Amino acid sequence: MRKAVEIARKARVLGLNVLGSPNAFDMEVRVGAGAYVCGEETALLDSLEGKRGMVRAKPPLPAHKGLFGQPTVINNVISLASVPIIMDKGAAYYKDFGMGRSRGTIPIQIAGNIKYGGLFETAFGLTLGEIIDDIGGGTVTGRPVKAVQVGGPLGAYFPRGLFDTPFDYEAFAAKDGLIGHAGIVVFDDSADMLKQARFAMEFCAVESCGKCTPCRVGSTRGVETLDKLAAGIEPQKQVALVTDLCNTMKFGSLCALGGFTPYPVMSALTHFPEDFKPVPVAEAAE
Ligand code: SF4
């Protein structure tokens, strides 16, 4: 990115007089320290201002009061990366790819237990099954796919039964999932979905900015509750508790970190209930 900025500046695409015009436009690259929450736009602004990345309450929206209190436009890289092709070939060309309200293409990152992992750009609309089986070639272990997490660490787990879901924002939302940044992680049938649910709660506890209670306290209580479930302590009570907790986090959190953590937890619980049943003591000891 820095090299690209340097080249653009030399070519006068950036600078005081862009391509000899009276218009000034410049860019600089700022590297974050790695906090997940700084992907949230207002935490990102705090981080850019040199503060600890904390989510700001909205309103005011960054478009009104953003970086250093000034009106600020914030876009994801994927939005910006779509601009050149639209400028070059026109909106109709770009719109021709995709389905429903999800138009254009999406770079999908396929990772985890997958034969042909990597980055694949494709039009919206392929089914999840086509992405996993046809593009990804199934698991690298050769075992059956058990679950696919779509949308990053806060994305829902999809079982094979939902592989006919088209890769489309609305279609995923209708199945209680999300496309997010289109990262896909594949798990074979040896995966323990209770452990994956715990991982989501733990991730939230570690990455929480601490501003609101449902996320800050809820994630820690979530880890404890799932640990009790794994230990076989009053399992029905723990399932009810974690479900209630997820509802509180989903609807009561200030940002998507706390608000989306319930997606991996509840999808694991809904689609793989057998993994949430305590193992009888004698069996566990074998
Ligand atoms: S949901 Fe979590 S990360 Fe977001 S504002 Fe609340 S405490 Fe911070």
Image (cartoon, rainbow, N blue to C red):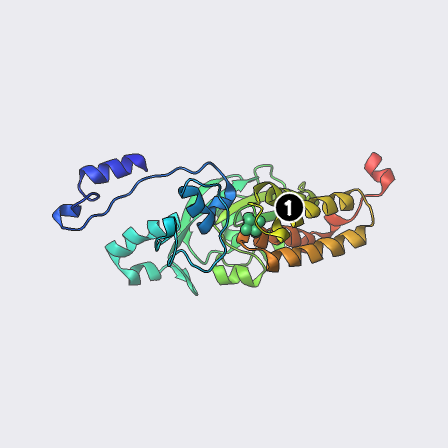
| For residue 13, side relative to residue 270 (left or right) | left
Percent x, y of residue 35:
50, 40
273 shown above or below 15: below
Residue 27 seen in the figure = yes
Residue picked out by circle 1? 201
Query: Which element type, helix, strand or loop, lies under badge 1?
Result: helix
| For residue 119, side relative to residue 11 (left or right) | right
Q: Residue furthest left?
A: 20
Q: Residue furthest bottom?
A: 100
Taking depth in this image into account, of 89 and 60 the one nearest to the observer is 60
Residue 155 seen in the figure = no
Q: Residue furthest right?
A: 282
| For residue 140, side relative to residue 279 (left or right) | left
Taking depth in this image into account, of 253 and 234 the one nearest to the observer is 253
Taking depth in this image into account, of 239 and 193 the one nearest to the observer is 239
Percent x, y of residue 120:
42, 45
Query: Which residue occupies 50% across, 54% down?
Result: 179
Quadrant placement of the N terminus: top left
State whether label 1 is within 8 Å of ligand 1: no
103 shown above or below 211: below
Q: Residues within 10 Å of mark 1 (few under 14, many from 20)?
A: many
Percent x, y of residue 20:
12, 47
| Amino acid carrying mark 1 in the image | Met
